[in-house]
């Protein structure tokens, strides 16, 4: 078991939940899907095709950050964390958080979103991509090619985490 606080991030359809759950299993720590932490109002808004704004996201990100910080032994959380200000918000409560960005091109994201059942419709992908700010060199974390096979992504991430 490794103590770690990891946020698997990226737009909807990037594979956060799958990779996050596999990574948590490999590290022997708890997996949390931040989608499950959204208030019902956020879920309803997204399901209706309305993008969330910062007023919707910030209280949710606070819940995500506290959950990450307070999980004994650490956790892997799947959370979009699309913008630097969102990641900074998480870091305020969980300063040792490491962000793993799943980098997937827009065409593949749309294909994945159209073939799954999820409360977020594919019509919101453009708003997610407009919000996306890739990890900066001064942030704790790294990007991984989200087009790789899931087990390969998990292997690469586990190695990079040390």
Image (tube, helix red, strand yellow):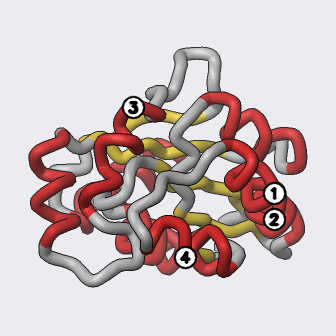
Of tags 4 and 2, the one toward the viewer is 4
Q: Which image quarter: residue 158?
A: bottom left
- State which tag comes first along the sequence, 4 or 2: 4
Q: Residues within 10 Å of mark 2 (few under 14, many from 20)?
A: some
Q: Which image quarter: residue 18?
A: bottom left
| C-alpha separation, residue under disc 3 versus residue under disc 2 | 24 Å
Asked whether residue 136 appears in the rendered view, the answer is yes
Q: Residues within 10 Å of mark 1 (few under 14, many from 20)?
A: some
> For mark 3, what is the residue?
130
- State which tag comes first along the sequence, 4 or 3: 4
> For mark 2, what is the residue?
63
Residue 44: image tag: 4
Of tags 3 and 2, the one toward the viewer is 3
Of tags 4 and 3, the one toward the viewer is 4
- Give the SS element for disc 3: helix
Asked whether residue 31 appears in the rendered view, the answer is no
Q: In the rendered structure, are the residues bearing label 3 and label 2 in contact, judged by CB atoms less than 8 Å apart?
A: no
- Give the SS element for disc 4: helix
Q: Is residue 48 above or below residue 153?
A: below
| C-alpha separation, residue under disc 4 versus residue under disc 2 | 18 Å
Of tags 1 and 2, the one toward the viewer is 1
- Give the SS element for disc 2: helix
Q: Is residue 148 above or below residue 28?
A: above
């Amino acid at each position: 078991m490794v103590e770690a606080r990891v946020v698997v991030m990226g737009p909807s359809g990037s594979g956060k939940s799958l990779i996050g759950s596999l990574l948590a299993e490999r590290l022997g720590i708890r997996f949390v899907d931040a989608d499950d932490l959204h208030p019902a109002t956020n879920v309803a808004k997204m399901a209706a095709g309305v993008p969330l704004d910062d007023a919707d996201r910030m209280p949710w990100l606070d819940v995500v950050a506290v959950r990450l910080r307070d999980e004994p032994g650490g956790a892997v959380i799947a959370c979009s964390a699309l913008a630097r200000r969102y990641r900074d918000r998480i870091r305020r409560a969980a300063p040792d958080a490491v962000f793993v960005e799943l980098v997937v091109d827009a065409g593949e994201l749309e294909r994945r979103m159209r073939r799954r059942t999820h409360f977020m419709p594919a019509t919101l992908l453009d708003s997610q991509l407009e919000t996306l700010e890739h990890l900066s060199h001064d942030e704790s974390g790294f990007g991984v090619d989200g087009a790789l096979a899931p087990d390969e992504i998990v292997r690469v991430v586990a190695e990079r985490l040390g």
